[in-house]
């Protein structure tokens, strides 16, 4: 499949804001909207974004309709998610991916949003961005300058700590580990060689181990993975075992690996393209 890199966002663009996952906090969300507008963007969102269904931000049908309409709307130049949580995986088998393929545009988020990003890449060939979100990152009292700078001016070279030396080439692919594992059973892995970037939050190391093993038990995963960029596993239990697990994983797969803590749920985070060609060399990731 030919992969599609959308146009970069620019000041003055209208950005559609969606909530495909967890319930929003109105005050924090609206604070995030105002702070995001200060960066020079216009925003559009529907009042429906505040809907509640159990722990979800409304019902699946409304969310799918909104995603498809925002992609079809030529006035909306990009889409950014409000927050993660849970809910995106409920949508991925019901979306019309031809709409996305025929109307490519910037799509950003992380955490639970990983499910949408990997399926947009798989079924529409759309390169998306692991990026800050409206409520989670712009709706806080102290917005990270690092996060904002990397969102407005994404880096093309990332220095990491070497876990296992070597070189690797492939598309950059991955995201939130627990969300990725929840997709097992679907056709979601890339056909291309890939460099796997991965992070999570509040997962003890034995669960990280289990989830990595679940992926490594998939033949296509083992065949196509060429390198790993370990992000931050924040608030994990048994942290003293994490480095050992990273070294063991790279060694078992016989691939190079680096570590970068700014691929994270924490305050200071990078914006990275999911699906763009990348390279690991001398402890650095090149995009």
Image: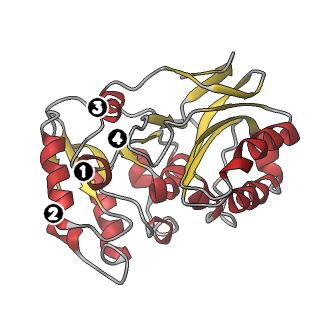
Q: Secondary structure at mark 4?
A: loop
- Decide which of 83, 99 is in the foreground and name it: 83
Residue 17 as seen in the image, left or right of residue 273 = left
Residue 96's image quarter? bottom left
Q: Please tell me which of labels 4 and 1 falls first in the chain.
A: 4
Q: Image point 70% across, 48% down: which residue?
A: 240
Mark 3 or 4: the one toward you: 3
Residue 185 as seen in the image, left or right of residue 138 = right
Separation of marks 2 and 3 at Cα, in angstroms: 22 Å
Instruction: State which quarter of the image contains the C terminus.
Output: top right
Q: Contact, CB < 8 Å: mark 3 with mark 4?
A: no
Is any part of residue 42 visible from this angle?
A: no
Q: Secondary structure at mark 2?
A: helix
Mark 4 or 2: the one toward you: 2
- Decide which of 158, 245 is in the foreground and name it: 245
Specify the label residue 140 is tagged with. 1
| Residue 124 rendering spot, x and y as whole percentages | 50, 48
Q: Which residue is mark 3?
A: 145
Q: Label 1: how many residues lie within 10 Å, few (<14), some (14-19) or many (20+)?
A: some
| Residue 60 rendering spot, x and y as whole percentages | 38, 75
Residue 206's image quarter? bottom right
Is any part of residue 121 visible from this angle?
A: yes
Q: Please tell me which of labels 1 and 3 falls first in the chain.
A: 1
Q: Secondary structure at mark 3?
A: helix
Q: Which residue is mark 2?
A: 27
Q: Which residue is mark 4?
A: 105
Indicate whether 200 appears above or below 88.
Answer: above
| Residue 86 rendering spot, x and y as whole percentages | 45, 68
């Amino acid at each position: 499949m030919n992969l599609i890199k959308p146009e970069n966002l620019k000041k003055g663009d209208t950005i559609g804001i969606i909530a495909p996952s967890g319930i929003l906090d109105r005050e924090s969300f609206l604070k995030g909207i105002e702070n995001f507008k200060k960066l020079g963007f216009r925003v559009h969102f529907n009042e429906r974004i505040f809907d509640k269904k159990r722990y979800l931000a409304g019902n699946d049908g409304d969310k799918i309709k909104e995603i498809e309409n925002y992609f079809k709307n030529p006035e909306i130049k990009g889409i950014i998610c409000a927050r993660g949580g849970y809910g995106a995986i409920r949508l991925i088998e019901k979306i019309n991916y031809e709409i996305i393929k025929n109307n490519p545009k910037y799509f950003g988020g992380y955490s639970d949003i990983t499910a949408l990003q990997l399926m947009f890449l798989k079924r529409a060939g759309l390169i998306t961005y692991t990026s800050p979100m409206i409520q989670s990152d712009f709706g806080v009292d102290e917005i990270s300058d690092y996060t904002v700078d990397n969102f407005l001016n994404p880096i093309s070279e990332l220095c990491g700590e070497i876990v296992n030396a070597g070189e690797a080439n492939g598309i950059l692919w991955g995201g939130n580990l627990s969300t990725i594992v929840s997709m097992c059973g679907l056709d979601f892995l890339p056909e291309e060689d890939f460099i796997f970037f991965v992070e999570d939050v509040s997962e003890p190391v034995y669960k990280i181990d289990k989830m990595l093993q679940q992926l490594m038990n998939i033949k296509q995963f083992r065949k196509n993975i060429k390198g790993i960029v370990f992000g931050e596993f924040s608030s994990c239990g048994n942290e003293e075992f994490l480095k050992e697990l990273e070294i063991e994983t790279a060694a078992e797969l016989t691939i190079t690996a680096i570590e970068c803590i700014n691929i994270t749920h924490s305050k200071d985070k990078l914006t990275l393209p999911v699906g763009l060609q990348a390279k690991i060399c001398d402890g650095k990731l090149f995009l």
